[in-house]
Image (cartoon, rainbow, N blue to C red):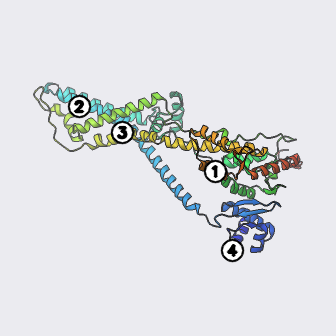
Amino acid sequence: MDPPAAADVLRRRLTDPKKPLSVADASVESGLSLHDAEVGLHHLTQEYRGHLRVTEDGDLVHVFPHGFEKPWETKEAFSRAIGAIGRGVAAAGRFIVRAWLLIAMVAYALVFVGIVIGLTFARQGSSDREGDTGVHILGGIFRALADALFWTFHPWSPLYIGGRYETFHHRRARHHEPDGVPFYEKVNRFVFGPTAPPPDPQATRTRILEEIRAQKGRIGLADVMRVTGLPRDEADPLMARLMLDYDGSVEVGDQGGIVYRFEAIRRTASDDPPRPYRRRAAAWDSPPKLAPLTGNSGGANVGIALLNGFNLVASAFVMAGGLTLANIGRLLFAAREVHPRGAPIVLPDDGLPIALGLVPFLFSLAIFVLPIARSLTRRWTARNVAKETARLAILREVLTRAPKKEPVSDEVLRKVYRVATGEEPTSKEITKRVVDLGGDVDVGPEGEVRYRFADLEADAEALEEERRRASDAEARLGKVVFASDD
């Protein structure tokens, strides 16, 4: 019987899934064979985030704290929905900002320059130069539009937004930009911060599989936590899933240590005899880092700020002067009428300018507000990064000492926490980390508080013995009897 089918029988037959279950218990209650009950329990352990216990006689006990329910799904679904909404809003925001910056940098800047020219012309209104100056103004307007079209759609433009030349554009951007980052991406970073690369869904599994090969096909939960940084309650069900996917099995040592065996993963077509594989770097060797606020150089940030500041000031000037589109048209063609020299041109009150006033003002203001808001939340983000670094540092101390059966003092854990966060940890924080790793309090000879991790110590002892007995023959393939390339 395949694991999902066996698990389905167990779900229907077990009356109290929250009760600890041995393989024999599950077999008796469900009527399944011992083998089917075992693979079904492993499948359920992965699906319902169960845990494994080992008795002093080496028997495995499966524990399902939530029974056959998934109370975390609502919370995780809500988190995924919020995350999806956040990513959607961010993506839409980035699109709007990119499109807006093309307009702000080209169209609005040129239009504002045109307004200045129009005001200058209106004050110089003279009937004897009417036609000549009008030609110059119209020529300037058409030149501004031509420049806007060129810088927006020409494939050699750094602001090009077409799709047909996208690859070519990026190649040119790498040559023209000192750091290889297109200007629109720098603006994107200025507003939203640097874009994080998408996570690789297979990265965690790959690290574990490489560690399995490096450790002669025998690993424990400590090895999984070491290379992935996962908490114990996540590493445990993950290993149950890997056993199903990669023909793994569980062995129990004399002291109750759990060893996960994956002999099939060792087989390789490489050197004979097989060379020892290098272990993966530990998770604490690459702790999380606080992302930069923008990721741009100081010069790029100053340039973007100045350009956006110009549009902010210009749009404020347009609103203060009541320069609606109709009034701007009146100013541009005011020279067609004869005005006494020095007489001001009175514009009617047409309401608040929207297209060239309120809209660019609000957008330009938002471009300044968003990075300021991100900088204000940066301290909270830095605190979370520091706490994760502290968790990994505590994990390092525990996993380094447990195989040697060395206790970990309370002061050592407090010290690594202080180094990582710059703050003094509370007793609750230290206790939580110790409990998560299955530790117990142990009093030293001088009354000092220290912690022992009996499960990890037993696992390390069992792993050492299993690896010592592992044969290199497991990694060798049989003799080739047929090859299509011969």
Mark 4 vs 2, N-terminal side? 4
Residue drawn 20% across and 28% down? 121
**Quadrant including the C terminus:** top right
Q: Give the side of residue 414 with respect to residue 189, left or right.
A: right
Q: Which residue is mark 2?
A: 118
Mark 1 vs 2, N-terminal side? 2
Q: Secondary structure at mark 2?
A: helix
Number of the label disc, if any, that sits on residue 431: 1
Q: Which residue is mark 4?
A: 15
* Residue 341 picture location, percent across and down: 11, 25
Q: How far separated are the C-alphas under marks 1 and 2?
A: 72 Å
Task: Return the residue found at the far front.
Answer: 446
For the residue carrying disc 3, how many other residues have a C-alpha within 10 Å: few (<14), some (14-19), or many (20+)? many
Quadrant hosting residue 421:
top right
Mark 3 vs 4, N-terminal side? 4
* Residue 321 picture location, percent across and down: 22, 36
Which is closer to the viewer, label 3 or label 2?
3
Q: Secondary structure at mark 4?
A: loop
Whether 112 is drawn above or below 358: the answer is above
**Three-letter residue code for mark 4:** Thr
Q: Are marks 1 and 3 in contact (CB under 8 Å)?
A: no
For the residue carrying disc 4, how many other residues have a C-alpha within 10 Å: few (<14), some (14-19), or many (20+)? few
Which is closer to the viewer, label 3 or label 4?
4
Who is closer to the viewer here, 81 or 338?
Answer: 81
Q: Give the side of residue 44 with respect to residue 288, left or right.
A: right
**Three-letter residue code for mark 3:** Ser
Residue drawn 69% across and 42% down? 396
Quadrant hosting residue 256:
bottom right
Q: Secondary structure at mark 3?
A: helix
**Three-letter residue code for mark 1:** Thr
